[in-house]
Image: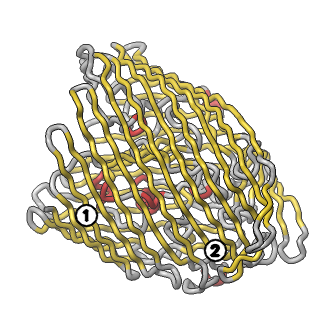
Amino acid sequence: MRWLILGLALAALPATVVAQLPAARDTGRTRNDTLTRPPIRLVPVTVTAAPTLPQQPATSVHVTQAAIQQTPAFDSYDLIRQTAGVEVHDQGQGPGFASDASVRGYSSDHSTDIATWVDGVPLNESVNGHAEGYDDWNILFPEAIQSVDVIKGPTSAVYGNFAFSGIVNIRTIEQMKGTDVWLDPASYGRGEGGLLGGFGNDTTHGVLGLRAVHEDGWRAHSSYDILQGHTRVVHQFSPTTTIDGGVELYATQWHSPGFLDDSQFTARDYNVVTNSTDHGWKLRGQERLSLRVILGPSLAWRTTAYATQGSWKLLLTIPAEPGTFEGGGGQTEEDDRRLGAGLTSALTWALPRGEITLGTAYDWAHSSYQNWNTTNAVRTDANALIAPAVQGEASLFAQASEDITRHLRATLGVRFDHQSTSDTPDSSLGPGMGTIAQPVVKASKSIFAPKFGLLYRLPLGLDLYGNISRGFRQSDGVIEDPTLPYITMWAYETGLKLTSGVVSGSVALFRDDVSNDQTLNPVTLEDENGGASRRQGVEVEVAMRVTPALRLSGDWTFQDARYTTDTYTEVDSVDGGSSVADLNGLRVFNTARYVGFATAEIAPPAARWTLRLTMNAMGPYSPFDEPGVVLPSWTLFSVTGVLRLGAAASLQVGVRNVFDLAYRELEAGGLITPGEPRAVYGALRYHL
């Protein structure tokens, strides 16, 4: 892969924290083929919530508010899949049971290889016994989202743990006039209602929202309810001082239908229920306060402090299967209670031809986790009792961006993290008989992650760039064994970007070399550490205004993800025997050969209607615990039409999976989560 390493350059720190300052001098663009920047303007107060900029030497996908509101999706994962082309494998067991989102060929159990941030608050849950970095996107309030940026690779020094395959950075609406009210009926007994309203004056403004969802479920025993609250308030104390606060509240309860075997899926026998007592619930809250102070004509200080709270209970049955599947046929109960807090603070200097940012961050997590074997929701014996597990991670980060010449920009970033974890396991004496406390287990570790990149501006709106960066994430299971090391990777990327009045896009070649890789079954949660793997491929992104009424866009990743040094222990659930499967050269489990989307948006300038056509495709992939097996690709088509009913109202109708394709959202160990059949979504919206 010398073509990657010899490409222009080496990892870029995307300027997610570009200077949010008034300009010291006019550095406006004098020619359209130079790198000189337009005058700096104020952007989000939050350090980690600035939008992605096109002059960054890295790959990203930007999703607009309009695309989010016009996409028929059954949850937040499906929404990001359809609008950003992210690979998603829906778990299908309830909204609190996080699905698997993947970027660049990572199996990403419960989306743990992606760092997700909402207005500067991380969603990934540390010291989580189900999956380290558990990442539940269902807390997202879709109507309140201003934009989504999916940053590919570990190229930003602002984001540390879990920013492995990429970053999903969500920004909510800061200001709006009036109130939007909506009622959204859909197939399978789904109904959604909510309101989102704005208020404010010259110095204070904000947004308040409430959303409720109920669905009977398209499978038997798959109903659920969601209730969400959203608040954001911004106050300007003076021309140089702004404070920005936000609250996200999320509650859900659900029933789980369980998984299917191959014969049931083939026969479309979707109403099989593994255990009628399988269910769960989750509560999550997060609060944020951000402060921006302009200290001078070229200096700004920004700080974000946050707190999180969560409570989660899950009862799920994994059926027994012969052969390699490890499941014993029993039901498992998991209970997670957690508190978290953190802070990110940064100083940014605006220079005549660049900027420098120095920052620090701290994240603290406290969790209590229990895992029980149960029979019809009655506990029998304990698998794990940990109370408490505590983790603190302190970080220092720096970035610099400099226009070396009129055409050449260099970025340099570095991040240092020090993590300390302790857990207190208990030994259970049996249900109702108490526990015996065991000695506290403690361990610490540190990691250094450099980033460097170059971008060269060519004629005709072309940019040639390259980068190299180091990424890391904590291994699964650290809640029981704090000594587990980080999973690490070196990421290489080079590509071309095009920006013009009619067409914009990019082509990128990438390669990731992963050390201490971990193979993890997203159904049975069995994992093994110590291997190595390689991801490499091509990404293509394009957006084109064909006519005033027609816009085409798409984003595609073609990847080859394979183990280079790894084995996996297969256990026969019938006789208990085991064998070692050599994974060297085989596909990385649960990652598709290609994934992408294409969209056509038809919006005649004088018309009262718009039409959006979307295609989502996922290529062949190898299910976990089935070495050498490759599942077929699938393609879904969706369509949405919006009709304006006067100045204040609109009617929206969408169809997801237009051709009623039967497809596998997820397969692991011979168990299958089927994809949702054709579904019709409606929306009646009114602006007060």
Q: Residue 236's x, y, as percent?
A: 23, 34
Q: Amino acid at mark 2?
A: Leu
For marks 1 and 2 on the same chain, the one whose residue lies earlier in the sequence: 1
Distance between the alpha carbons at the discs numbered 1 and 2: 34 Å
Q: Look at 51% across and 79% down and name the residue there.
A: 222
Position of 150 with respect to 516 (left or right) is left
- Where is 161 relative to 299, above or below? below
Q: Amino acid at mark 1?
A: Leu
Dot 2 falls on a residue whose secondary structure is strand
In depth, the one of 381 and 570 nearer the eye is 381
Q: What residue sits right under mark 1 in the picture? A: 195
Q: Look at 34% across and 73% down and name the residue there.
A: 655
Q: What residue sits right under mark 2 in the picture? A: 316
Identify the image quadrant of residue 138.
bottom left
Which dot marks residue 402?
A: none
Q: Residue 345's x, y, as percent?
A: 45, 30
